[in-house]
Image: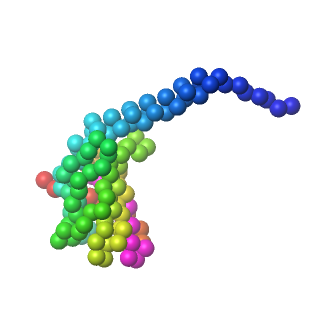
Amino acid sequence: MALLLWLPASSLALGALTTAHAAEMRQSAVQGDEQRLLGRWVRPDGGYVLELKEIRKDGTAAAAYFNPRPINVGRAEVSLKDGALAVFVELRDVNYPGSQYDLRYDPKSDQLIGSYFQAVESQYYTVGFVRLR
C-alpha cells in the first residue's frame, strides 16, 4: 500500500519563502559579525600575513596576502558555515596558481583556523592565523 502526501501549492511557496528568509537571516548575521575579521592575521608557522580590509554586503572581501611580498588574491569571501564565520581566500599568482585557504573564525581564541590547499604540490595543510596587534 502506497502512502500519498498532498501539499497545496501555497505550502510549496511558503517553503521557498522560508528558505529565502533563512538565507537572508544568515547573511545579515554575517554582516553583523564580520567586522571581527577585519585586520591583519599572521600564520605563526611561517610569517604569512592575511589582511582583510573590507567585507562587502554580498560577502566578497577586499584582502591582501604577503609571503613576505604581496601575493595576488584572486578571490576572497566571508560567509556563515555551520554557525561560524568562514573565510575563503584564493591566491592567483606565480607559484600560487589557485592555492586556497578555507578558514573558520574561533571567537574564543580569536583565531582563524582551517586548511590551506597548496596548488603546486596538490597538498592540504592544517593552518591557523592569529591576529596581529
* Residue 108 x, y percent position in the rendering: 29, 44
Q: Give 15 or 119, whichever is nearer the viewer.
A: 15
Query: Which segment is the magenta one?
Result: 111-122
At 26% across and 58% down in the image, what residue appears?
129
The answer to whether residue 7 is above or below residue 47 is above
The answer to whether residue 8 is above or below residue 58 is above
> Residue extending furthest left?
133
Assign the magenta stretch its main secondary structure.
strand
Q: How many marks?
A: 0
Q: Is residue 112 magenta?
A: yes
Residue 10 appears in which quarter of the rendering? top right
* Residue 45 x, y percent position in the rendering: 26, 68
Relative side of 119 to 43, left or right? right
Residue 101 appears in which quarter of the rendering? bottom left
Give the colouring mode of the picture. Answer: rainbow
Residue 132 appears in which quarter of the rendering? bottom left
Q: Is residue 105 visible?
A: no
* Residue 91 x, y percent position in the rendering: 31, 66
Relative side of 38 to 13, left or right? left
